Image (spheres, coloured by chain):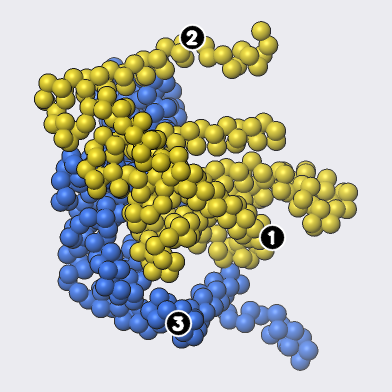
């Protein structure tokens, strides 16, 4: 009996759930309970911290409206074009700088130090150059994602195994074949990592530009909820946006096999 | 010539590319000036570089750019202090409590990928249109790298150092103060450096977006007044300040690694 009691005492309280999972659930429940208490307490101005029910309703309403998907499509299109333009130009510049040490020493420091500067401050210039419609948002997204992609590709080029390059040369591959058959496959991980960073930067650049001056897109919807003080809808929109951004980031990393590199 | 001096002096092979890079930029600027003067580029869209250079004087004399710079620097400094205090404390706590680390480290890493700056309207509602919105948003955006790098630095402390501490019967506090923290300091500073870079980007960005505060607001102000040369000059000034800031942080980090 004592043995049975000891055994039952030693068994986990909830079979199948590890202590880590239990702690995670406890943290989530604790945060949600604290949130609801704060919402109901009236300590803050009304709706600054709306109740979970209000946020949940706003979330359902948001996701069931076709209007939201239209604006999501507009933003996704802008980010997609920005990634295409910024990605290919970053790839080209990265390959050129990575393949030539002289050019790398001449120009890469400028890219390296310009990369982390705040890009949103270029928005007035982009408006002047490309107008107030979607083009200026795409341009800002392009500018934002160009630097991480170019720098990652240039660094990736320098890390390519010399043996692979010599194999290509011994087969008398021309420049295009070298890029297509040797360089690009050998540095797929830095390219994907640059793409992941570039995606994050393009997303931020495009959406911030939309919040500043736009009449469509997710950024516009977010700033609209601020203008009309619809806080549950603003929270709902930020939740969806964060989930999409973090999910896309993780997906790019997983598809590119970056997780397996880190684990190895 | 000492060994140090030999390292510091750039070899001739490295000076030439740097000169070529600089010369290329000067040439591009001269070419732009020429194309604007002959009317190929519209001067009401891209002002001539000479006009931009002239505008720098106006930024100092009329736009109080030094005061604005100090305001932005102050916001970055407060954010830096906050991310250092909370980030290092959070990292140490998560390193000490393994279960907490296993449960939350992935969340912190995921949060680092979240576009936090887009929540600026929410922060404006909570804190109002003032410096606290800017500081708190920069704080939230810049916190994850400090926490993650602190955990990484603590976890990477060489086992032999920890064993030395144990053999001297150090208390957990002494072990932390004398062994773990000094060993993790370079990694922690790398986290703080990344955090400060994020902080600067977010501070200037939010100043621009909410039209409040220092250098970011100046760009917005000048653009609203359609002072194109002034806008370009202010953007150049922000880039210059950012680059000098990154170089200074890098130098401090390198010095810390040498000391380590």
| Residues beneath discs 1 and 2 located on the same chain | yes
Numbered disc 2: secondary structure: helix
The correct choice, above or below, for A3 with respect to A237 in the image is: below
Mark 3 burial class by Cα count in 10 Å: few <14, some 14-19, many 20+: some
x%, y% of residue B36?
Answer: 16, 25
Residue sitting nearer the eye, A28 or A187: A28
Q: Disc 2 designates what residue?
A: B12
Give the Cα separation between the discs numbered 1 and 2: 50 Å
Task: Mark yes or no: residue A47 visible.
Answer: yes
Q: Residue A70 location in percent, x, y?
A: 17, 64
At numbered mark 1, what does the secondary structure look like: helix, strand or loop? helix
Res. B96 image quadrant: bottom right
Residue ID for mark 1: B96
Question: Which residue, as the protein is rendered here, is positioned at the far front?
Answer: B62
Q: Earlier in the sequence, mark 1 or mark 2?
A: 2
- Residue for point 29% across, 39% down: B231
- Provide the letter of the chain coloured blue: A
Residue furthest to the bottom in view is A1
Depth check: give the residue in front, A166 or B8. B8
Look at 54% across and 34% down and name the residue there.
Answer: B248
| Residue contact at pointers 1 and 3, CB within 8 angstroms | no
Q: Residue at x 79, y 56 (%)?
A: B173
| Location of mark 3 (residue) | A39
Viewer-nearest of discs 1 and 3: 3
In-front residue for pair B215/A188: B215
Tell me the distance, in whole angstroms, between the alpha carbons under discs 1 and 3. 33 Å
What shade does chain B have?
Answer: yellow
């Amino acid at each position: 009996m004592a043995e049975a009691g000891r055994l039952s005492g030693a068994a986990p309280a909830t079979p199948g759930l590890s202590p880590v999972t239990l702690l995670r659930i406890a943290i989530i429940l604790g945060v949600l309970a604290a949130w609801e208490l704060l919402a109901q307490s009236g300590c803050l101005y009304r709706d600054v911290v709306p109740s979970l029910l209000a946020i949940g309703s706003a979330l359902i309403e948001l996701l069931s409206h076709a209007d939201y998907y239209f604006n999501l499509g507009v933003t996704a299109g802008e980010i997609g074009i920005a990634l295409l333009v910024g990605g290919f130009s970053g790839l080209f510049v990265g390959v050129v700088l990575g393949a030539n040490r002289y050019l790398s020493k001449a120009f890469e420091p400028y890219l390296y130090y310009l990369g982390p500067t705040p890009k949103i401050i270029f928005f007035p210039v982009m408006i002047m150059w490309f107008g107030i419609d979607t083009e200026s948002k795409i341009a800002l997204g392009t500018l934002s994602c160009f630097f991480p992609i170019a720098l990652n590709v240039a660094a990736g080029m320098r890390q390519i195994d010399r043996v692979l390059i010599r194999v290509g040369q011994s087969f008398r591959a021309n420049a295009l074949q070298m890029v297509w058959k040797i360089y690009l496959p050998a540095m797929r991980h830095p390219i994907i990592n640059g793409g992941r960073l570039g995606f994050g930067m393009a997303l931020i650049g495009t959406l911030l530009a939309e919040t500043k001056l736009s009449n469509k897109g997710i950024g516009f919807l977010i700033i609209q909820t601020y203008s009309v003080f619809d806080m549950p809808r603003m929270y709902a929109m930020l939740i969806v946006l964060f989930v999409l951004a973090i999910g896309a980031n993780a997906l790019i990393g997983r598809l590119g096999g970056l997780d397996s590199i880190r684990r190895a | 010539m000492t060994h140090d001096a030999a390292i510091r002096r750039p070899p001739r092979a490295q000076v030439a590319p740097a000169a070529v890079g600089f010369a290329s930029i000067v040439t591009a600027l001269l070419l732009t000036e020429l194309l604007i003067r002959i009317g190929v580029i519209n001067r009401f869209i891209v002002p001539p570089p000479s006009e931009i250079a002239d505008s720098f004087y106006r930024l100092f004399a009329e736009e109080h750019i030094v005061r604005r710079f100090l305001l932005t620097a102050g916001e970055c400094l407060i954010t830096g202090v906050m991310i250092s205090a909370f980030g290092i404390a959070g990292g140490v706590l998560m390193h000490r409590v393994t279960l907490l680390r296993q449960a939350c480290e992935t969340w912190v890493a995921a949060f680092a990928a979240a576009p936090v700056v887009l929540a600026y309207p929410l922060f404006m509602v909570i804190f109002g249109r003032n410096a606290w919105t800017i500081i708190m948003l920069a704080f939230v955006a810049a916190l994850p790298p400090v926490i993650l790098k602190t955990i990484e630095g603590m976890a990477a402390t060489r086992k032999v150092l920890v064993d030395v501490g144990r053999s001297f019967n150090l208390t957990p506090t002494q072990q932390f103060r004398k062994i773990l923290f000094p060993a993790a300091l370079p990694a922690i500073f790398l986290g703080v450096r990344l955090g400060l870079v994020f902080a600067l980007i977010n501070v200037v960005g939010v100043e621009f977006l909410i039209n409040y505060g220092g250098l970011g607001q100046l760009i917005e102000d000048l653009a609203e007044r359609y002072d194109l040369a002034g806008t370009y000059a202010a953007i150049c000034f922000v880039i210059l300040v950012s680059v000098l800031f990154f170089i200074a942080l890098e130098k401090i980090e390198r010095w810390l690694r040498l000391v380590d």
